[in-house]
């Protein structure tokens, strides 16, 4: 048996998977490969027929039953008891409601993002602040004190949010090593925040470029095409753009707003993330214009790495997603924006028709002594298909992170609700690394001002290239 086929942990309970889209279908073979448990103890509860053939392939019980505010307890309570596991990979089902249910039943829990009930992302009765990821995170974080030492509930542990939090820690250790500092992993939040401050990290991008393409089946008019959950992408893309707001920032955006509650680690812009672009960089793509789509890690990382002097923030990095999806998804976004953000009548999740390409997913840490450093996963579609069935390059980076979170939760059963930043990055990376393709790190002298002053003189801050106003495309 090879290393990647070994069982990481045994599990004697029942596993209930809510949602069975691309991530559910992709993680199922990983769970069966690496967690020692019989297939007959797994049940899928999902709103759609999609994926029934995959469940049948593995002999998994499949229940088509949409979950709502009114029925979720009635449906799920008989399936969950002490020591069982609720794996939430759904959309339009409240994560907070499911975490509370799992805690009441004595069950483990994991999700890949904090979801509201259906319509929560665009609820016209709520202010932009109230329907932000910031607000969703605050509602989930409120459960930490309530259920401290309860069954472990891993919140927001996919690729991003999730895996990228572990990439940041590995990247900081690399920078420390390369700048003559001790490359020793801190043991707590205060230690990691102090390391980020000592290194001088001003900005962190989750810098991702997806180049997967279906050469023989291009996007059609009236069709939204993507390599992962279309409903999830459009939902978060229609939320306000959000970013962790660093202590070095001196130019507050004209359309920026602060929240009047919570940790105050982030701001939001009065425009949707799918309509907001920023300059970023990855080693293979080079400079790129990316979408500033709201994500939990933009807030959680900024909060986690905050250093305070009493009530004053002494240090905090600016953090946000800088995402260039596959080219067909970019075309889909242009079309949906032109239709006032109304979804196209047809949706297509690219999987088997992908002919080439990769997902270059990493973190870009900027402002330290060596300028900028990108660290992350380069996973091609060819390698993804060899490594695990029912996955493309994008989904496998998510599904293996789900596996890593499951393993960590079972090995640490009484941790209560936790975010990705708060768990052992080294253990999760041990589980995930065999499935991430090439793990690469690269320094660069790129800044968001590169070439701009020569070609297009603009209103920029030349004294500090790492100001958000220099990254934003206007």
Image: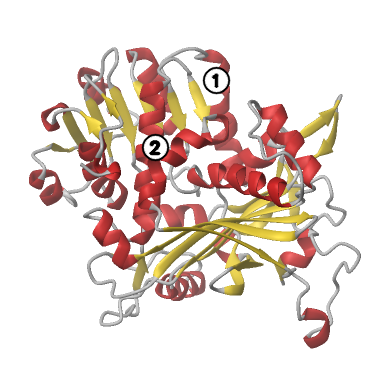
Q: Nearer the viewer, mark 2 or mark 1?
A: 2
Q: Residue drawn 34% across and 38% down? A: 403
The image shows a total of numbered marks equal to 2
Viewer-side residue, 455 vs 328: 455
**Which of the 4 quarters of the picture holds residue 41?**
top left
Residue denoted by label 2: 404
Q: Is residue 193 above or below residue 433?
A: above
Viewer-side residue, 80 vs 42: 42
Residue 458 shown left or right of residue 46 in the figure: right
Residue 281 shown left or right of residue 18 in the figure: right
Q: Residue drawn 75% across and 58% down? A: 255
Q: Residue drawn 39% across and 58% down? A: 437
Label for residue 443?
none
Q: Position of residue 372 (x, y in %)?
A: 71, 60
Q: Is residue 233 above or below residue 244?
A: below
Mark 1 surroundings: few (<14), some (14-19) or many (≥20) residues within 10 A: some
Mark 2 surroundings: few (<14), some (14-19) or many (≥20) residues within 10 A: many
Q: Position of residue 213 (x, y in %)?
A: 35, 75
Extreme residue in the right direction: 463
**Mark 2–mark 1 distance (CA, rounded to whole Å):** 21 Å
Viewer-side residue, 347 vs 229: 229
Label for residue 144?
1
Q: Position of residue 347 (x, y in %)?
A: 30, 65
Q: Is residue 461 visible?
A: yes
Residue 404 shown left or right of residue 307 in the figure: left
Which is more N-terminal, label 1 or label 2? 1
Please say if the residues under marks 2 and 1 sit with CB atoms less than 8 Å apart.
Answer: no
Q: Is residue 350 visible?
A: no
């Amino acid at each position: 048996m090879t290393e990647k086929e070994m069982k990481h942990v045994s599990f004697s309970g029942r596993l209930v998977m809510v949602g069975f889209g691309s991530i559910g279908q992709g993680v199922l073979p990983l769970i069966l490969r690496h967690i020692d448990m019989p297939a007959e103890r797994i049940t899928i509860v999902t709103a759609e027929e999609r994926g029934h053939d995959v469940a049948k392939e593995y002999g998994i019980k499949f229940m088509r039953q949409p979950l709502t505010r009114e029925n979720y307890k009635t449906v799920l309570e008989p399936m969950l008891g002490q020591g069982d596991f609720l794996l939430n990979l759904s959309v339009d089902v409240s994560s907070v409601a499911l975490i509370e249910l799992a805690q009441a039943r004595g069950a483990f829990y994991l999700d890949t993002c904090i979801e509201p009930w259906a319509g929560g992302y665009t609820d016209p009765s709520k202010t932009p602040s109230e329907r932000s990821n910031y607000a969703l995170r605050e509602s989930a974080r409120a459960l930490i004190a309530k259920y401290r030492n309860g069954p472990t509930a891993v919140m927001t542990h996919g690729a991003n949010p999730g895996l990228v939090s572990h990439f940041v820690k590995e990247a900081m250790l690399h920078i420390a090593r390369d700048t003559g500092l001790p490359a020793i992993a801190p043991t707590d939040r205060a230690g990691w925040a102090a390391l980020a401050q000592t290194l001088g990290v001003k900005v962190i991008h989750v810098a991702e470029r997806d180049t997967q393409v279906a050469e023989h089946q291009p996007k059609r008019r009236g069709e939204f095409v993507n390599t992962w959950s279309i409903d999830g992408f459009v939902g978060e893309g229609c939320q306000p753009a959000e970013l962790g707001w660093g202590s070095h920032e001196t130019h507050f955006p004209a359309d920026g707003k602060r929240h009047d509650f919570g940790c105050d680690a982030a701001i939001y812009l009065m425009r949707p993330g799918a309509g907001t672009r920023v300059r970023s960089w990855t080693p293979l793509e080079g400079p790129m214009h990316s979408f500033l789509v709201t994500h939990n890690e933009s807030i959680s990382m900024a909060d986690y790495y905050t250093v305070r002097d009493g009530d004053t923030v002494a240090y905090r990095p600016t953090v946000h997603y800088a995402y260039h999806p596959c080219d067909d998804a970019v075309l889909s976004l242009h079309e949906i924006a032109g239709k006032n953000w109304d979804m196209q009548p047809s949706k297509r999740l690219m999987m088997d028709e992908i002919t080439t390409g990769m997902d270059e997913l990493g973190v870009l840490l900027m402002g330290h002594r060596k300028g900028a450093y990108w660290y992350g996963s380069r996973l091609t579609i060819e390698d993804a298909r060899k490594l695990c069935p029912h996955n493309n390059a994008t989904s496998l980076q998510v599904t293996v992170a789900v596996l890593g979170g499951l393993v960590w939760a079972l090995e640490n059963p009484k941790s209560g609700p936790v975010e990705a930043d708060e768990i052992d990055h080294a253990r999760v990376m041990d589980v995930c690394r065999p499935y991430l393709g090439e793990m690469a790190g690269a320094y660069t002298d790129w800044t968001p001002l590169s070439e701009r002053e020569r070609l297009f003189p603009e209103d920029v801050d030349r004294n500090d290239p790492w100001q958000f106003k220099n990254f934003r495309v206007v």
